[in-house]
Image: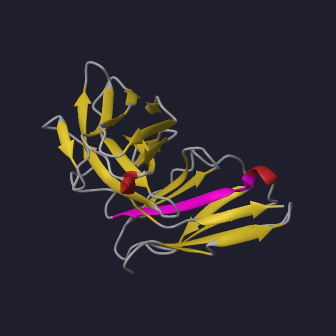
Amino acid sequence: AQSVTQLDSQVPVFEEAPVELRCNYSSSVSVYLFWYVQYPNQGLQFLLKYLSGSTLVKSINGFEAEFNKSQTSFHLRKPSVHISDTAEYFCAVYQGGKLIFGQGTELSVKP
Amino acid sequence: GAGVSQSPSNKVTEKGKDVELRCDPISGHTALYWYRQRLGQGLEFLIYFQGNSAPDKSGLPSDRFSAERTGESVSTLTIQRTQQEDSAVYLCASSLWGLGGPNEKLFFGSGTQLSVL
């Protein structure tokens, strides 16, 4: 069975600082990987995904993630965060028609 | 509809009672998923419906949990003889054809907060 591990449960950063939210997956076969975001008191929203092709994928709000097969990682990054990026971020892997989610990383952006 | 709709948004029940949670997926979406999110934890897969295929029930935690789906529309998640450990947010999601395609993704509802006293 495939799984993902989010290495940090909480990541506090200051506004305009860069951030990296780490995600590692366990699979020896082709993987589809996703990131979802859950803003306070809101439902989960799709952020970005990797299926194949370019290993660097980008979202519309400045986040990007890089698929690294040798390190089995799919870390999420943003060069400069805003207060509004405060949310919980979930990494997920596709398995048998469904998504298996990690435990989540709470990003807290402070002024 | 415009998005995935879940009802009720909040449900408080007594231990031992049965509860039914409802999900209306986005119109035309053939795949429907139920997840559970306990406080401070990640999403736990429960069950997945894809068209007319047999559902994937591999995530249901016990035989007290069951779910049905009417065609490619409404789904109901039923929890019998509720226990305090069932307290969680129950999330429903849908996708057009499933997640294997390049443009596919899950659209989530706002969830049902279940509290078992």
Query: Hey, which residue is sitting farthest bottom in the picture?
Result: B1
Q: Is residue B1 above or below residue B46?
A: below
Query: Hey, which residue is sitting farthest front in the picture?
Result: A111
**Magenta part of the protein: which range?**
B86-95
Q: To which quarter of the image does residue A80 belong? A: top left
Q: Is residue B20 above or below residue B105?
A: below
**Which x, y percent locates residue A66?**
23, 34
Q: Is residue A59 visible?
A: yes
Whether residue A21 sits left or right of residue A69 in the image: it is right
Q: Is residue A23 above or below residue B9?
A: above
Based on the picture, tell me whether residue B88 belongs to the magenta stretch.
yes
Whether residue A22 sits left or right of residue B70 in the image: it is left
Q: Nearer the viewer, residue A19 or B116?
A: A19
Q: Residue at x 35, y 46 (%)?
A: A15
**Which x, y percent locates residue B52?**
43, 64
Q: Nearer the viewer, residue A31 or A24?
A: A24
**Which x, y percent locates residue B113?**
65, 64
- Magenta portion: prevailing SS class: strand
**Which x, y percent locates residue B14?**
85, 65
Based on the picture, tell me whether residue A101 belongs to the magenta stretch.
no
Q: Is residue A95 visible?
A: no
Whether residue B76 sits left or right of residue A38 in the image: it is right
**Count of numbered tags:** 0
Q: Nearer the viewer, residue A52 or B53?
A: A52
Q: Residue at x 47, y 62 (%)?
A: A43
